[in-house]
Amino acid sequence: MNSRGSEDMNILERLKAGIISTSDAETEAIARTLASQIPEDLTLALYGELGTGKTTFIRGLASAWKINEPVTSPTYNILAIYRGDRTLLHLDAFRLENQSEIEELMIDEFLSSPYCLAIEWPENIENWLSDACWKLKLEIHDKTKRFIKIL
């Protein structure tokens, strides 16, 4: 097996231990590698303060799934939908304050298999997340380093 195939296979183990990223390009590359391991119809919750690289990580997923549209933080729109090899729903829950607000978005109406629902600021809708959700924590280690870990 080539080193790329080996890297793809152990990305989950590496993320469970935690990976240091030293640039946006490296964060996107980590996400592109993880994208091949994300099961269909999964919710991915990305935890982290402002500036930790959550949107950058989602950009990497989009790149892996051949989504050509620019991926930006949907803070004001709350939800963005991108289509490529898979449907990527990008939810920014920063402005959501309660369970009814997430239900009013009727996200289920937009879930077209195979999809990935990537949520920034999931702590605001924690009760809405399923147990099958993958939780990813991004942290700032210093001005140039980010720590990325599956919880």
Image (cartoon, rainbow, N blue to C red):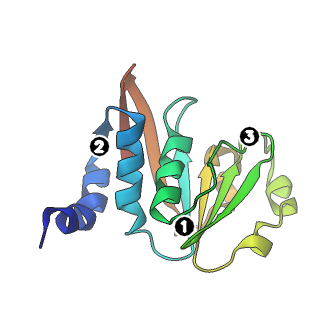
Viewer-proximal residue among 65 and 92: 65
Q: Horizontal and vertical percent for residue 28? A: 42, 47
- The disc at residue 131 is 1
Residue 135, compared with residue 2, is above or below; it is above
- The disc at residue 19 is 2
Q: Answer yes or no: is residue 150 visible.
A: no
* SS for dot 3: loop
Amino acid at circle 1: Asp
Viewer-proximal residue among 145 and 150: 145
Q: Residue at x 36, y 49 (%)?
A: 29
Q: Is residue 6 left or right of residue 55?
A: left
Q: Horizontal and vertical percent for residue 63? A: 48, 57
The residue indicated by pointer 3 is 75
Residue 102, compared with residue 115, is above or below; it is above
Distance between the alpha carbons at the discs numbered 1 and 3: 25 Å
Q: Horizontal and vertical percent for residue 44? A: 53, 59
Do the CB atoms of the residues marked 1 and 3 lie less than 8 Å apart? no
Q: Horizontal and vertical percent for residue 133? A: 53, 64
